[in-house]
Amino acid sequence: MRRPLGPVGAVLRHVVLMAGAAVMLAPFVWMVLTSFKPQAEILVAELRLLPTRWAAAENYATAMTRVPMLRFLVNGAVVTAAIFVLQVLVNLPCAYALAKLRFRGRGVMFAVVLLCLLIPHHVVAIPIYILFHQVGLLDSYAALVLPFAISVFGIFLMRQFFMTVPNDLIDAARIDGLGEFGIVWRIMLPTAVPAITAFGIFSVVAHWNDYFWPLIVVGSEELYTPPLGVAFFRLNDQGTEYGPLMAAATIVILPLVAAFLVAQRRFIEGITFTGMKN
């Protein structure tokens, strides 16, 4: 058993954690404070946290009206939700098969999943782009969603979680007459809510913030996602408008922060793989 920390150790631990949190939060705090400043106070030599003249209303109004930011946010929500739903539909049966079914080649298939974790998406971007061009799917929601319908990380995460589920529960479901797909959707899905929530946070954050893939497959402004919308405010003919740029970035990040705060308990449970207990 690990000895409990004394008062000094507890204080040091909290000091280290608070210092780490301050370092991680500093860029976000600076982004929000910059969104409150006029352009003249942003481009100054001295460091000022708070503005002398508040321009929050102007910057946020510009961020929402200069470009159709609301449309971009809706596009981001549609794309990330569609990707997550497809990933769950694919990940759960695959993870269940790798965790609970016995068949020849299961170990090889799991090794392939682990191998695919090492392959960056950018490596296969050009072949997928050429394929979508040939079948006429470029500049569409399908081009933004379909390449990410299968997530090897999601399969791995769900498989590890399903390994903690007692086999007796699955055997009881089979005795009651449930087939394998019935077990997946009626037994494993409710059990895996913490893992699904944890994976959902990873998936939504990754695809909400994705700039590379939408940039190369989308040409119509009506299909732009939030990161492409934020790019409108930088390097224009009059120079970068840092106030509206930071305001737009803040607007884009707020849904992610809200989602994490709502799901943080389930997220931590899923990451620690706390499955059902006997």
Image (cartoon, rainbow, N blue to C red):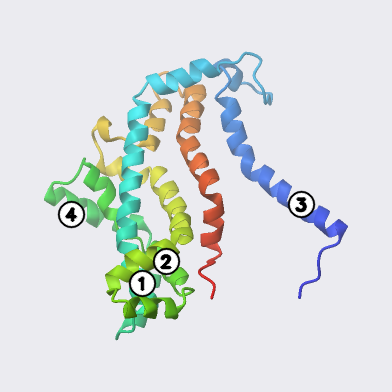
For discs 2 and 4, the disc positioned in front in the rendered view: 2
Question: Which of pointers 3 and 1 lies earlier in the amino acid sequence?
Answer: 3
SS label for mark 4:
helix
Give amino acid for label 2: Met
Label 1 vs label 2: CA separation? 8 Å
For discs 3 and 1, the disc positioned in front in the rendered view: 1
Q: 128 and 272: which one is in front?
A: 272
Question: Which of pointers 2 and 4 lies earlier in the amino acid sequence?
Answer: 4
Location of residue 118 with respect to 57 vertically, above or below: below
Location of residue 97 with respect to 60 vertically, above or below: below
The image quarter in which residue 234 lies: top left
Residue in view at x 39 percent, y 67 percent: 188
Residue in view at x 38 percent, y 19 percent: 65
Q: 108 and 97: which one is in front?
A: 97
Read off the residue under disc 4.
131
How many numbered marks are there? 4
Please identify the quadrant where the N terminus is shown.
Answer: bottom right
Residue found farthest to the front: 176
Circle 1/circle 2 CB separation < 8 Å: yes
Read off the residue under disc 3.
14
Question: Which of pointers 1 and 2 lies earlier in the amino acid sequence?
Answer: 1
Question: Which of pointers 4 and 3 lies earlier in the amino acid sequence?
Answer: 3
